[in-house]
Image: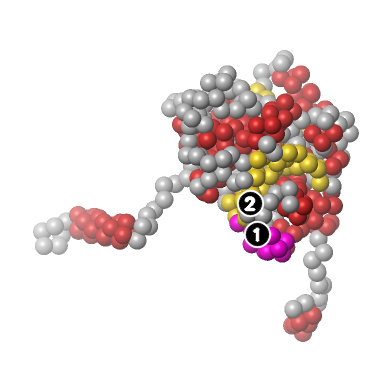
Amino acid sequence: MVGGVPIFHLLITTYRLHNEQYNTENTNNKMSFHQRYTGLIERYRDRLPISDDTRIISLGEGNTPLIKLNNIPRSMGKDIDIYAKYEGLNPTGSFKDRGMTMAVTKAVEEGSKAIICASTGNTSASAAAYAARAGITAFVLIPEGKIAQGKLAQAMMEGAVIIQVKGNFDDGMRLVKEVASEAPVTIVNSINPYRLQGQKTAAFEIVEELERAPDFHCLPVGNAGNITAHWIGYSEYAADACGHVTDACSLCDGHCRYAGGPLSGPKPKMVGYQASGSAPFMRGAMVDDPETVATAIRIGHPQSWDNAWVVNKESGGWFDECDDEEILAAQKLLAENEGIFCEPASATSLAGAMRDINSGKIPEGSTIVCTLTGHGLKDPDTAIAQSTAPVVKINAEMEEVKKAILDNM
Ligand code: F0G
């Protein structure tokens, strides 16, 4: 007791006074504690097909950094703003988590005990993680020998049942569709409409951060689910409430429940870049033997073929292709000059954008967003194989360290 007041009460009062003072100071300085971020479904719950009772399966995905590139635009000598949307910073290291939180949340809501996907790697890592979180089983079909080590490690650690197919992604996808019609498993590839619903939120974040849409949004294209999802997001944010949004979305049969948003200016032109050896959108037809160092987009039969053409037409954008050399050069450039490490497939967006900026197809004065879909750590083998960083081997002697430093200043 102090002067008749219990010590505990004094402590509480002091604590409250301190906090009130702190909060007042914070308000004055326009600083406050942020609410804990708990993932994109919670953040955009009014714009996603969930109800108040839905049990959300989340790992805190979304809310990824939009990094303005400094050194690359300067070295190009162009008056251009390029932003990298670094989706590699999602919980499993790729943009797939945006779609997977929605797909697994809905699968669990609908009573599913197992999910299944075909994958070039990232979808399998994401499916495995969200299934583990939900307490259900993930079956993942991956092309034997053609998935990056980091992705395989993830799926294995996260307890997925891994089915290695002697074939490519397209073979796996065909099998998944067939088996899902006969077995009690939910497909969580991007043909699952909830995947695109989750992924559309990347466009929301970009608009909110830039307070406008970019003029051009550049993405690597495999199945073309992600370019479609982004277009749905931009279109919803730009639409009049209850108006028609885009033919690329079939969720609400033309009567979009989520139309209306803060975007008053124009929507971006959506530009999709493919790897030359896996470029069905450039060939105008499916490719049966896709090949590229960017294994994530080694896909010859895109699942969102029709939607991607709708996006192309509605947005006024285009498709183009980059060869493996250009892709790897862009990956290295980003890491060396901006400190951003993405996987090869992701760098396709920057490789293509740089070519189109240099040619003037993307004019000076433009604001461009390039999505970097996956983290560089996903594929350490390709990174180390192409790195030219000096590795100096020395004996554990001071003089030798000094020499190594002086020789490489
Ligand atoms: N970038 C990365 C890193 C990817 O993993 C993928 C697709 C894409 C781009 C292309 O996106 O298919 O929506 O056009 N990866 C899938 C997978 C196929 O299985 O992980 P898309």
Residue 59 magenta: no
> Which residue is rendered at x = 52% and y = 35% of the image?
238
- Whole-percent x and y of residue 140? 73, 31
Residue holding disc 1: 79
User: Is residue 67 left or right of 317 when viewed as pictured?
Assistant: left
Q: Secondary structure at mark 1?
A: loop
Residue lying at the far top of the rendered structure: 182
User: Is residue 176 left or right of 24 when viewed as pictured?
Assistant: right
Magenta span of residues: 68-79
Residue lying at the far bottom of the rendered structure: 399
**Circle count:** 2
Residue 75 magenta: yes
> Which residue is rendered at x = 48% and y = 25% of the image?
242
Q: Secondary structure at mark 2?
A: loop
- Whole-percent x and y of residue 306? 72, 26
User: Is residue 244 left or right of 383 when viewed as pictured?
Assistant: left
Residue lying at the far left of the rendered structure: 4
Cα distance in 3D space between marks 1 and 2: 8 Å
**269 to 141, vertically: above or below:** below
Towards the viewer: 55 or 67: 67
- Amino acid at the residue labelled 2: Ser
Location of the C terminus (image quadrant) = bottom right
> Which residue is rendered at x = 71% and y = 63% of the image?
77
Q: Quadrant of residue 277?
A: top right
- Colour convention: secondary structure
Assess disc 1: are there few (<14), some (14-19) or many (≥20) residues with their C-alpha within 10 Å of its C-alpha.
some
- Whole-percent x and y of residue 34? 41, 50
Residue holding disc 2: 366
- Whole-percent x and y of residue 316? 68, 36
Towards the viewer: 368 or 66: 368
User: Is residue 374 left or right of 30 when viewed as pictured?
Assistant: right
> Which residue is rendered at x = 82% and y = 72% of the image?
393
